[in-house]
Structures are given as C-alpha cells and as structure tokens.
Amino acid sequence: MIELLRRFGGKFRRYMVIGPACKLIEVIFDLLTPLVIAQMIDKGIGAHDVNAVIHYGMVLGAMAVIGISFTLVCQKMAALTSQGMGTDIRGALYQHINKLSYAELDRFGTPSLITRITNDVNQVQLAVALGVRMLIRWPFLAVGSMVAALAIDLKLGMIFLICTPAIGLVFWFVMARCIPYYKQLQAKLDRIALICREGLSGARVVRAFVREDHERERFAQAADDQAHTAIAVGKLSSILNPVTFLVMNLGVCAILWVGGIQVNVGELTQGQVMAFVNYMTQTLTSIVYVANLVVVFTKASASASRINEVLNCVPSITDEGNQPVALPKPGNAAPVPALSFDHASFSFGAGAANAVNDVTLELPLGKTLGVIGGTGSGKSTLVSLISRLYDAGTGSVSVMGSDVRAWPLDQLRHVVATVPQRASLVSGTIRSNLTWRDESATDEELWAALDMAQASEFVRNKQQGLDAPVEAGGKNFSGGQRQRLTIARALVGSPQILIMDDSASALDFKTDAALRHAIRERSMRGAAEGGLPLTTVIVSQRVSTVRDADMICVLDHGSVAGLGTHDELYTTCQLYREICQSQLRREELEGQQGSATSTSTPGAACALASTCAKEGC
C-alpha cells in the first residue's frame, strides 16, 4: 500500500494534508464537547440557570456547525484523492498490461488481470478515502479522550488502562486470523471471474452440448467456496464489535459506580462524571472504528500487493535503446531474406518441453511460406516469434536481415502484420476496426484492403458501408466475415510481411483461393511498382491452402519434419504425405508424383486460383 501511495499519491499530496487537517479541527471540537456539556450540567442545570444552559447550548451549536463545515471539506479532499488515485492506478495498470508480452499475460491470466484492475483497485480506493477521512480522527480522538479523562480524575482513569488493553487483545486475536483469509478471498474471486468469462464467452458451445447444468454447478462450487471463506472471516470479524462494546459498557458501569461514590463525597461533580462517561465512550468507540479501519486496510494491503505484482512485472520483451531499422532497397544486388530462423527454440516456462525446437529456415522477399502440421505442433508459436509476441529462448529470428530483438516494436509490428487465429473485432464501426494499423488511411485504401480480403461485397451491402456498426467481438458478423475483416485490417498500411495464422479456416475453398490469388497479385504489383514485394506466411491445416507456397514447413511437435515445395515434400516427407492422403482424392494422389500441375480437390484450390484470376473474383 505504501508503494502505491509513493507512486501515485504525489499529485494528491495537498489533498492528503488538507483533508486530515480539517478532520483534526473537527476532532478538537469533539474533544471540547464533553467539557462544554459538563459546564452546562454544573453551571446551568445544577444551578437552575436557564441563561447558562442557553449560552452553552449556543456554544455547542456553533461548534457543531464549524465541525460539519470542516468535515465537508475533508470529505471532498478524500473523494478527490481516492477517485484520482484509483483512476491513475487503473490507467497505469492498463497501460502496463499492454506492455507485457504473451508470456507474462499467460502467467497472470485474463480473469485475474480483470479482477485486479477492477475489484482490487476498488479496495485500494476505499482504503485511501477512509485514510484521509478517518485515519486521523479515530486514533487522535481515542488518545485525546483518554488524556482528557485522565486530566479530570486519575482514579477513574485507571478504568481506561484496564479496558483499553482488553480491547487491544481482542483486536490482535481477530486480526491475526483474518489477514490470511483476505488474500484467499481475492484469489477465489479470480476463480469466479474465470468461470464467468468462460461460461459467458462460450455460451453457444455450452448450449450446443447441453452443459448448462454443469456450468451452473461449476459456478455454484466456486461461489460457495468463496462464500465459505467470506463467512469464516465474517465470523471472526463479528467478534470485534460485540466484545468491544461489552468491554466499553462494563467500563461505563464501573465509571458510574465509582464516579457516583466520588460525587457523594464531593470529589467530583455530576458534569465531570458525565464528561468522563462521554470520553470513555469516545475512546472505546474510536478503538472499534480503528479495528474496522484495520480490516479495510488489510483487504487493501492484499489488493495492493496484487496490483504491485503486475506493475512490478518487468516485460520480458522490450525495445529500449533500439534504433529504427533501415529496410532493404528494392533491386538490391544481394537482397536480404525477408525471414530467417537460425536454430530458434522456445518453451513456455522453465523446465517445459520446447514448443518450437531448433527451427532453421530462410524465406526470400516476396515469397510465400506455408506452415502445416498437426494440432499442437507449434505452428502458431513459431509465427509468433516473428513479430516478437514471444522471444526465442535460444537461437535467433530475423526480419529483413535484422534480428527481431534489434527492431523497435512499433516499427517491427508495422512491417509485420499478423492476422490471429481467432478473429477479434472491437465495438465501433468497420472503419474504426480497419484503421488500427493506420489511422490516417483513406477510404480508397480501406476499400482496396477489403477487396483483397474478399470482404468488400458484404461491406458494400451494409446500408452504412464502412460506418456500419460492429458489436463487441464482432458478434453481428459471421465467422467468415470476421476473418475477412481481420485480414483486411492487417492489409491496411501496406505491410511488408503478412502472417495469416490459420485465419481463413472459416472461408470456403473458392474464397480462400481467391484471397491467396489477390495477395499474390498484391506482391507482384508491389515489386513491379518499384517497392518491396509482399512476403506472406500462411499457417493452415489445409493442404489446399499451403500447396502453392514457395516453401512449406512441416512441423511435428515443434520440430521441422520437412521443408520444401509441395512436390518435394510429398516425395520426401512421410508426415506431409500422410496429411495429403487424408485430404486429397485418389486421382490427385495418383497424379501427384512429379506432376507440377496436379490440383487438390476438396475444392481444387489451384484450379480455383486460375479460375478466379480469369473471372476477376
């Protein structure tokens, strides 16, 4: 908590001084109130002097008005501080989370990060607000009441010295057992957030498999687990107030008993006894509130540690000190490769098996690399190394002749456009989604990207065209439409390398072939116009999608099982041949050996590419 105050409290320092100072003035009036009441009783009521009662009543009224005025100022300072710090912490958290690499995001998990940026920040805000408003009031009121009571009578003050340690002992007993529970509560809230996110985002799948009862049971178990912990800590916390008030009331009884005797013998006045009772009540009530404050601060401390864990997490991928990389010039006599893997390996965490293992390959500018393999073979992980979503553990990955670690991340991810495996759109419009890579892109450029991605037809059919609304996650579009929009988004801004991570899986074979033909034409047109040709990396499960690639990389458990053209791999790579045999018809397989014109037929991709070229589809 202290670390967060140091980091974010600087700009609110004056509020944190003015607020407690105003509260201190209010407390002073609270401490003077019992003395004024004592004078009212002794000089007014005891002496039957109405004027004295009215006089001291007016004094009490004036003190109350002044106290309330300072309280309102303190409340405003507390609100400005807590809300301001909460806003800054959320902003810093969100900004820092966006700097983390995939490795750190995988470690924390999305549900946990959402809980930290919402619930945990709320706990810290509450603690800050109460700290400004109450942290000075109750401790100062408790100590001040005790000193004032001892100044009235030392014998009655001994009752304070007995009651206060008794309450402190109860307080220590409860807090020592509550603190571990609060940390468990936050972790169990993460679990509830995870189940909610899975159940709501996968609602269609849950209903398709009739798993509603199972999901309700999962949620109920997580909620009950969290509730049991909350009840356990609630039971412990519930001891505080009853025991504290019991001690306080016993102390009041003792004061009245002893004080009554002293009044009878003339050592104390009735007003002094009442003042003593008021001070006793203020002291013990303050201790109760201090206990409640400690509960709030304990929760906030657990939340602050979780927030600091994220803020102090150093991103494993940074570009600090990296200078812009000069792109190769078109027509260079010795062109550099667009992509180069040099014995690159990567694993998810220490001790884990390599997800990518000792990959070495080189792809020239303007060529197409197809990546194919079974599920879990490391295809997506391999292409994630190109744009530094992950960093290779050993070996190196180079783009345009420079190690990706030497590139500024902004420049690298402008040169390399990635279409993720899961099509992701955000709420807004088609235009706002397409301009992520280039906010200044013109309508002409957006339509060109949509044409290339085979998405212009359904966008033109929208009444609002580019300004048609997009719901959260793109739920108002079909799977294929979402994929084509994400491909168009990647093409805006003229990238030099396009990575399509199984991003055409929802497209029919004709649209898929037309898309690849349009991308190939875009590469040739870029070279013809004197620019750099577009280099493409296509990850797919379909042989028909990768068979026309200049180079195909076959992955098996993260390792390269084969590298070459379609014809070469069919002859030399058993795994690739098995994939082909599972997807191609017998006639194609019989004509495969040495045939440069063979076609695949779950849609006949090569033939479709030619057809699309003729028909302009």
Image: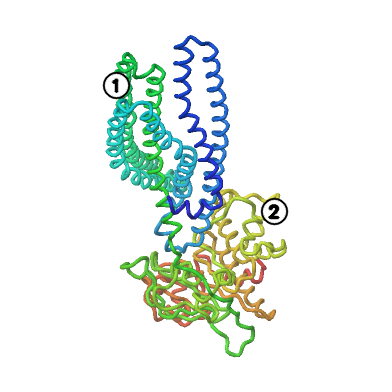
Q: Residue furthest front?
A: 266
Q: Name the element at disc 2.
A: helix
Q: Residue furthest bottom?
A: 333
The part of the image, by quadrant, that contains residue 154 is: top left
Residue 171 to residue 345: above or below: above
User: What label sits on residue 48 in the rendered view?
Assistant: none
Residue 462 appears at what percent x and percent y?
68, 51
How many residues crowd mark 2 within 10 Å: few (<14), some (14–19), many (20+)? some
The part of the image, by quadrant, that contains residue 285 is: top left
Q: Is residue 203 visible?
A: no
Is 515 displayed left or right of 543 in the figure? Answer: right
Residue 494 appears at what percent x and percent y?
64, 70
How many residues crowd mark 1 within 10 Å: few (<14), some (14–19), many (20+)? some
Mark 1 belongs to which amino acid? Ala
* Inter-mark Cα distance, 2 to 1: 82 Å
Residue 129 to residue 536: above or below: above
Mark 2 belongs to which amino acid? Gly
Asked whether 340 or 324 is in front, the reply is 324
Residue named by callout 1: 254
Q: Looking at the image, which residue is at 29% across and 42% down?
A: 176
Could you tell me which quadrant the C terminus lies in? bottom right
Asked whether 113 or 524 is in front, the reply is 113
Residue named by callout 2: 465
Is 394 displayed left or right of 545 in the figure? Answer: left
Could you tell which of marks 2 and 1 lies nearer the N-terminus?
Answer: 1
